[in-house]
Image (cartoon, helix red, strand yellow):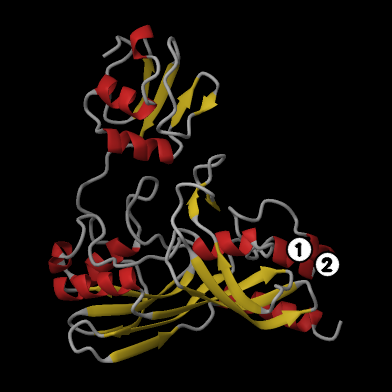
Amino acid sequence: MPANSEPSPSGPIRITATADQAGQRVDRFLADAIGTLSRSRVKTLIDEGRLRGDSGPVTQPAEPVRAGGTYILDLPAPTPATPQPQAIPFTILYEDADLIVLDKPAGLVVHPAPGNPDGTLVNALLAHCGPGFTGIGAERRPGIVHRLDKDTSGVMVVAKTQLANDALTTAFATRDLDRAYTALVWGLPQPLSGEIEGAIGRDKRDRKRMAIVSHGGKQALTRYRTIRAWQTSVALLECRLATGRTHQIRVHLSAHGHPVVGDPLYLRRVPSAAKAVNQPLRGQLLDFPRQALHAASLGFKHPRTGRPMSFEAALPTDMQALLDAVESQLTGC
C-alpha cells in the first residue's frame, strides 16, 4: 500500500498511484491498495459519490488510474450490523402472524443505509414486532420485500415470517401482484393514457440520480393514465409498474416531459407548464417540499393462504391540500 495514510474506520483515505499501477480499474486499484475493503464495497462507495480525483468526482468504477493521480475515498462511519428497535409510530392497515400492511408516511426511510443509520421503518418494525423479526430476510433490512423512496408515501407490505418473506419476494420479482401510484405532474401527457419504456441505469453525470440509458441499464416499463387534468398545466396520473426499478416512475415521467411536482432530483428547472399558472398557486406547486407521489394501492395473494388481498391508502394531507388548491384555483380558468 502506498505510504500516504493508514486506513481508518471512517473518514477520507488518500492514495497516490504509482507508475506501475497506471491503467488499472480504479475500484480494483483502491481495493488492492487499501487491503481492508472488497472491490464490490469500493464500487458501492464510488456509486454513492464518495471518491474524488485530482480533477473532481470519480463516478465510474472502471475509470483507468492515472500515474501520479491522487484519489480520496471518503469512508462512512461504521454502523451496527443489526438495527436497534425504536418506537416510531406508523399506521397499520392490516396485520396477522405473517405480514404487516402499512401506510408509510413521507419522510420515513425504509431501511438503514449510509446517511440514515437509524430512525427508519425497520427500526420501528423491530420495536413493534419484537426480537423474532431480526431473523427474517437480510440482516439490516428484515422483512423488507420492497421499498418506497423516503419522500414517497403509501401502501407497503412487510413480511413477519420467513415463509411470507420468500413468497412476497418472489411475487415482487415476478410481478405477480398489482400496485398503483398516484402522481401529480407538470403538463398534460399526450396521449392521456399510454406506456413509457426505457432502460434505467445510474446517471453518469450525477450518481445520485437514475436515467434512461442506452447501455447497461435494466429494462423498465411504466403504464399511466390521466385521472384529472387542469388545462395543460398539471395533471393527476395513475401509474402502474410492469417492472420495479429505482426511481422508475420519477425517471420515466421526467424523461417524458412531465416531471412529478416537487421532485428534488428530476425537476431541476421551472417547467414551461408553470408559466400558465398564476401566483400564489405557482409558488405552492414549485415549493412543494417533496415529490407528489403516493403508493395508492397494493394487491397480492396471501403468502400462506393464497387468498387475494387488496389495500388502499388515502392521499396524505399535504398532497391532498395541494390538489385542493389546484382544483379551486384552476377549475374554470
Q: Secondary structure at mark 1?
A: helix
Q: CA distance from mark 2 to mark 1?
A: 6 Å
Residue 35 point in image, percent of width and height: 22, 24
Residue 101 point in image, percent of width and height: 33, 79
Residue pictured at 63% horizontal, 60% vertical:
254
Between 157 and 84, the one nearer to me in the picture: 157
> Within 10 Å of the Cα at label 2, are there few (<14), some (14-19), or many (20+) other Cα atoms?
few
Q: Which residue is mark 2?
A: 279
Residue pictured at 26% horizontal, 69% vertical:
169
> Within 10 Å of the Cα at label 1, are there few (<14), some (14-19), or many (20+) other Cα atoms?
few
Q: Quadrant of residue 310?
A: bottom left
Residue pictured at 67% horizontal, 51% vertical:
268
Q: Which residue is mark 1?
A: 283
Q: Quadrant of residue 77?
A: top left
Give the residue type that dot 1 points to.
Answer: Gly
The answer to whether residue 213 is visible is yes
Residue 137 point in image, percent of width and height: 19, 63
Residue pictured at 54% horizontal, 49% vertical:
214
